[in-house]
Amino acid sequence: MWKFLYNLGLLLAAPVIVGVLVAKPRCRRGLPQRLGLEDGLSGLFGLSRRPDGQDRPDQPDRPVIWVHAVSLGEAVAAVPLVKALHERHPDYRYIVTTVTDTGREAVEQRLAGVAEHRYAPMDFSWAVTGMVDRLRPVLYLFVETELWPNLLWTMRDRRIPAILVNGRLSSRSFRRQDIAGIRSLYRSVLRSITLCLMQSERDRQRIVALGADPEAVHTTGNIKFDQPLPVMEGETSWRRSFGLHEGERLILAGSTHPGEEELLVSAYRRIVTEHPSAVLMMAPRHIERVDQVEAMIRDAGFVAQRKSRIGERVVGPRVIILDTRGELARAYRESVVAFVGGTLVPVGGHNLLEPAVWGRPVLFGPYTDHCAEMAALLDEAGGGRRVMGVEDMVRCCTEWLSDQDACNTVGQAAKRVVLDNQGALKRSLELIESCLDSAPAHSLSLVAREA
């Protein structure tokens, strides 16, 4: 019943959904793939383009492992997993799908030569079927509880193992899904999943409560703790690219949202009176908001510099806007103090580990539902502090800017949290590999022929 009702609802909503995709410029890219077509209308006939421009049936010569990572955070988390699988099983072809352009960029930059990118299909039955028919995956991995009913039902019907990796359920998601009227829908979807590899015991309990098979649910930890350090060029060139001068100290606020950016500028106004060498850098979570953020900074009376346009020498208090993609994780290394956004406003928070891996003190606000485990670990270890607003932020920043030894102690505690909690990737890989044995035999035979 639920399958019929779900697809009826999607069919009725299809004109609106497609209209929204066409209306939003950032959603137009990859629209044929989102609708289940590989190369425009040729996808309707199961055709794709060869390098010489000729149509041919899309019959890859290697079995496919399909990994889905909805956006930037999930794509970054999936990178070490895909690399490890590729290293252990090089005979497979790896396809990573995302919904957003930031996710696509992360895949193309970090998995070049390892995996191919596609845009994920909308959950229309024809779009899902089109993608599955072309890829013929032997294994489907999806990161952080991206539940699409038609996709998971299709995997179940075709006996393709589907594995939830790094799964989590925020309090908001759990409340929304734990409603009597739709609980049986979630049970049907969750029972289509072969394995659920959850970040924490709390996440394990929640997904079982929603209907997942308890025997299929495992607590493996958070693979974000296993992220390798970004590759860096020389420290001097990085500081120069940010327009930082000798003696200036960077306070970096990453993945910021509307509402908290104004609070950060207000706190910086007070910090800089005691520490005039402090420079604030903000990295808006959504880069298309750069104009808005720059106008706000100028209205507040500060010099605003876009990282992409830094040219002439500017000295003194100012706010740098990180308006380039793919540089935030590395930029944290240049900071003295880091703040992770989405936590002073009710978003739920972003990746607290990105500054921690560099041994930087981590500040975060009260809204950490999406990163609750990381926040608790950093707080307990003394590697981070929860700030409730401007007053707390000013106090913490001035304390650490005044006492370099104390700042280093907190930063090293943050780094220790990362090192002490690694191992989720290894545990996840062992369980994933156990499912490769149950992959469809017709696809695996391709590997045997190559061997």
Image (cartoon, helix red, strand yellow):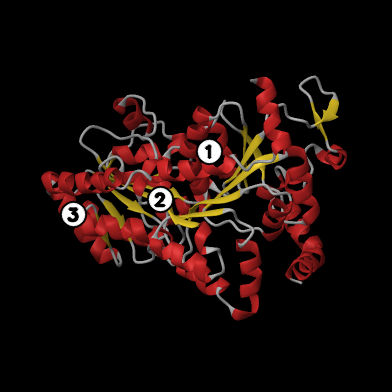
Q: Nearer the viewer, mark 3 or mark 2?
A: 2
Q: Which of marks 2 and 1 is nearer the N terminus?
A: 1
Whether residue 135 is visible: yes
**Residue at the spot 69% in from the left edge and 51% down from the top edge:** 155
User: Of label 3 and label 1, which has the lower sequence position?
Assistant: 1
Q: Which of marks 3 and 2 is nearer the N terminus?
A: 2
Tag shown at residue 26: none
Under mark 2, the amino acid is: Asn
Label 3 or label 1, whichever lies nearer to me, is: 1
Distance of label 3 from label 2 (alpha carbons): 32 Å
| Residue 59 vs residue 20, the one in the foreground | 59
Of marks 2 and 1, the one in the foreground: 2
From the viewer's perspective, tell me whether residue 294 is left or right of residue 128: left
Q: Can residue 319 be seen in this view?
A: no
For residue 440, side relative to residue 85 (left or right): right
| Residue assigned mark 2 | 222
> What percent of the width, then of the height, locates residue 216?
53, 57
- The reply, left or right, for residue 204 in relation to residue 242 is right
- Label 3 crowd bin: few (<14), some (14–19), many (20+), radius 10 Å: some
Q: Disc 3 and disc 1: Cα gap in Å?
A: 35 Å
Quarter holding the N terminus is bottom right
Label 1 crowding class (10 Å Cα cut-off): few <14, some 14-19, many 20+? many
Residue at 18%, 54% in the rendered image: 398
Q: Position of residue 334 (x, y in %)?
A: 30, 37
The foreground one among 296 and 202 is 202
- For residue 113, above or below residue 76: above
Mark 1, secondary structure of its residue: helix
- What kind of element bears circle 2? loop
**Residue 265 figure quarter:** bottom left
Determine which residue is flagged by label 3.
398
Q: Mark 1 points at which residue?
A: 106
Q: What residue type is labelled 3?
A: Thr
